[in-house]
Image: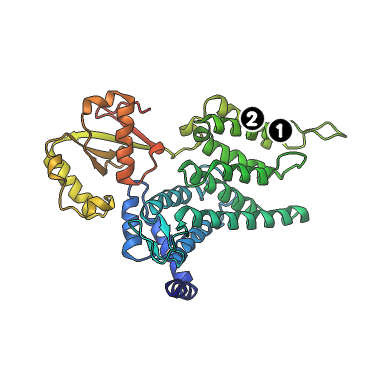
Amino acid sequence: MADSRLCQTRRKVSGAEFDSVVRRLVDGAEPLALRETMYKIRKGSLIEDREDLNALAECAFNIIMETGEDSEHTGPSSRYARPGELLADIFVLLRLELPQFCSCGKNLRDNGRCCLTPEEKAVTNTRILLNCIQRRYESLMKQFAESEKAGTVTTELEFKLAACVTFIGRLYVRKLVAARVVAQVVAETIGVSQRQPHPACIRCVCELMLLIGHFMEDSKPGEALMGQFITRLNNLRALRNAGTNLPIYDETIRDILFNLQDARSLKWPVTACVPGFRVFLQYIDVDWLEADRDWQELRKRKALPPNEMLLDSLPSNAGERQHVKIVSMFSGRTVAVACPQNLELLTDAKAAAELAELISESTGTYQRRIMLFKPDSTPLAVC
């Protein structure tokens, strides 16, 4: 317990400093260079135990929910969209590097037990994040309900609600939270029956649906759950005043609901619904010398996976295999070096998916965001 208490004391004294460091990391982070950000987190000993991880999660919500002059803008062009995407990707990498913690707070590596008794279970990275999500969301919904009752809902509060709910959606598509968490958030935000939710609640749930629809409907249970969400939203769109027979919600909200239904009928076109979600990458066939040179540059930038950072060069047995460098189609910057078994096999969608997975592991970029192109700039089909 001593280490945990020391950490809590340090956090009370330097909480503002911790917040400032996280903000600088996020401001300087690039979606295709998050390995470098992780190196900075490790080098700066930013996360030494679970209290630090909890503080990072709290800071993440502060960053995405802070308001500004443009706080009335929601959706993919909002000010919370980019940091939300970056922070969600960072939490994916943190789960890999800091999977669980001892009851005393220490990080457990290599299946260590520290002071855990045989019957005790370690505290997982995901559980710490979920606890933070629950606290922040419940606090925000309580504040929103009180303001709605008093008729004092502000644009700032609407902005915070949209930022919080969509951040949870970004964590869901990265498999950091379960579908049941999303279902609970939707139920508490717009209700399941009778209740007539505030227009801002409907708007932010529609934005959430655009984020998660493509991923949720990948499975039968998810498709059924999405059907429940859409049915509830359609019922809200159809609500009319009993006395005047006029729609309860104005035309703007009804249009948002109609556009959501249209997006679903088109199988959730991700690039249309969430501009900037896709990461456009191109693979280029290179010899071992060029591959090693690019690999060395990535190592110098601390942009390689942790296991490769321990090496001095590409593994010697890789010298006889084909190599490709992966470049960003926008910046032209090399972001990874990969060694596929046979480039000719990339005509097969399954083999192409394996390359995408390899690139995802190397860059820390969520696989579903990656759109691959061949050397001739034609899209590579990935299953």
Instruction: Report which residue position mark 1 lands on.
Output: 237
Vertical relation: 25 (above or below) 260: below
Question: Which mark identifies residue 313?
Answer: none
Residue lying at 42% horizontally and 73% vertically, measured from the top left: 3
- Badge 2 crowding class, 10 Å Cα cut-off, few under 14, some 14 to 19, many 20 or more, is some
Cα–Cα span, label 1 and label 2: 8 Å
Name the residue rendered at 47%, 52% in the picture.
Answer: 126
Q: Position of residue 317 (x, y in %)?
A: 13, 41
* Residue designated by label 2: 258
Q: Is residue 65 visible?
A: no
Q: Amino acid at mark 1?
A: Arg
Three-letter code, disc 2: Phe
Q: Secondary structure at mark 1?
A: helix
- Residue furthest toward the right? 243
Measured as percent of width and height from the top left, residue 80 is found at: 51, 50
Q: Is residue 186 visible?
A: yes
Asked if labels 2 and 1 touch by Cβ distance under 8 angstroms, the answer is yes
